[in-house]
Amino acid sequence: MYEEDRPDQFLLLTEGRVRVWRTSTGGTAMTVHMLGPGTMPGCVAALRQMPYPATVTALTDIRALSWPADKMRQLIAAHPELASNFLQMIAERNEEMLQRLHEVSTLPVAQRVARALLRLAADGAPGEGGVQVALSRQDLAELTATTLHSVSRLVSRWERAGIVAAGRKRVRILDAERLETEGETAE
Amino acid sequence: MYEEDRPDQFLLLTEGRVRVWRTSTGGTAMTVHMLGPGTMPGCVAALRQMPYPATVTALTDIRALSWPADKMRQLIAAHPELASNFLQMIAERNEEMLQRLHEVSTLPVAQRVARALLRLAADGAPGEGGVQVALSRQDLAELTATTLHSVSRLVSRWERAGIVAAGRKRVRILDAERLETEGETAE
DNA sequence: AACGCGGTTTGACGCGCGTCAAAGAAGCAT
DNA sequence: ATGCTTCTTTGACGCGCGTCAAACCGCGTT
């Protein structure tokens, strides 16, 4: 599913995770959000019958249900409650973006990365001995509007402090509480 | 209409302009967007029956129509097309925020301010001899996630270059084309 | 085991832009 | 006019963080 393409179907992700991202004319990429099972990537565009505003790529193997777009529209017309569900969904994304916007505008990098990790951990696999976040430094950087270098430095620092355990393409959060306060105390 | 409040009515702005903004726990304010006639401030929150995620204040004298929230919900249930209109509206805001997010993450201050001015001009009063944007430097700063000092410097520079005409609480765009390229050439 | 590739780490350096500080203008009230 | 307030301009300075550069490390391949 690509930016600019026109949607002809609805998707409901049942397994796996995807990354929604965008590139600018300048070539810099930014990740809009990560979506997991139960979400409907591209549903806004499909409802509006407009081109996608972003690109979606899979992070893992995925499985999804799909309907033809026009069938879905018929369904909605027949069952008004459905429309209200969609509204809820979009409004939630809206709220999320609002928050991201605010963070990017006002918070220093350390806090942004810390929050991103915590947010990802929230709906990630709560593995044994700390929650695992399976993303590369580069991915984290695009998600927080910074560079992989800065992320790397931060993660290293936090590892030395015993707050996280770093690995190749993954970060395990050991001490969520301290991670939360990391940003503020960084002054 | 304030952040955290619960909505009990729908508004349709018919005259004037309002500013939608948010404050963080740290006290820093950021403007989410400006809305003009024909828009419905707070409609998302009213639909969701959730607290407002932001505060709305008037920039000018305003006039608006209002309905009780529950009546509106009945209306939507009775006329499914209405729901789809709302979807369109929210999706548009979504798209706008997506763009803002991208800009804030990747563009230097000069470009952000330039674009903000152009966007404001697009739906502003196309006055005589250039389009007028009636906002203080501070307002522009909050809208572009920067400081009034930076905005002031930029506007001064552009004025010296003959691109805009500055005034107290207003900026008049004289040469939109050059303003567009300002950001890029700043390297 | 040797190789290579993508990912990560770390340092050095510099610049954009925010912060601090202070002096103008423009508008309003008395 | 004379203040007073709010908005704006301009300078000096410094720091956060991006950029450039180079080494290092897992991990799959042959």
Image: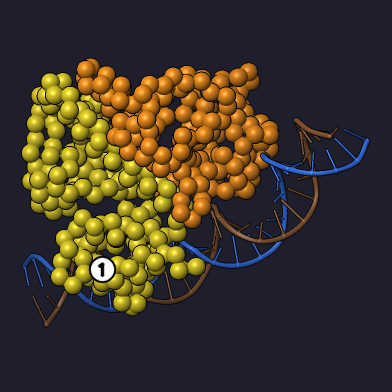
Chain colours: A orange, B yellow, C blue, D brown
**What's the chain of the residue with tag 1?**
B
Percent x, y for residue B162?
31, 77
* Secondary structure at numbered mark 1: strand
Amino acid at the residue labelled 1:
Ile
Q: Is residue B1 left or right of residue B145?
A: left
Location of residue A141 (image quadrant): top right
Residue at 62 percent of width and 48 percent of height: A149
Say which of C19 and B178 sits in front. B178
Say which of C28 and B8 sits in front. B8
Tag count: 1
> On screen, C3 above or below C16?
above
Residue at 16 percent of width and 20 percent of height: B77
Residue at 29 percent of width and 41 percent of height: B93
> On screen, A138 above or below B17?
above
Percent x, y for residue A174?
61, 27
Percent x, y for residue A52?
39, 38
Residue that label 1 marks: B173
Location of residue B91 (image quadrant): top left
Percent x, y for residue A21?
47, 40
Q: Is residue A19 left or right of residue A86?
A: right
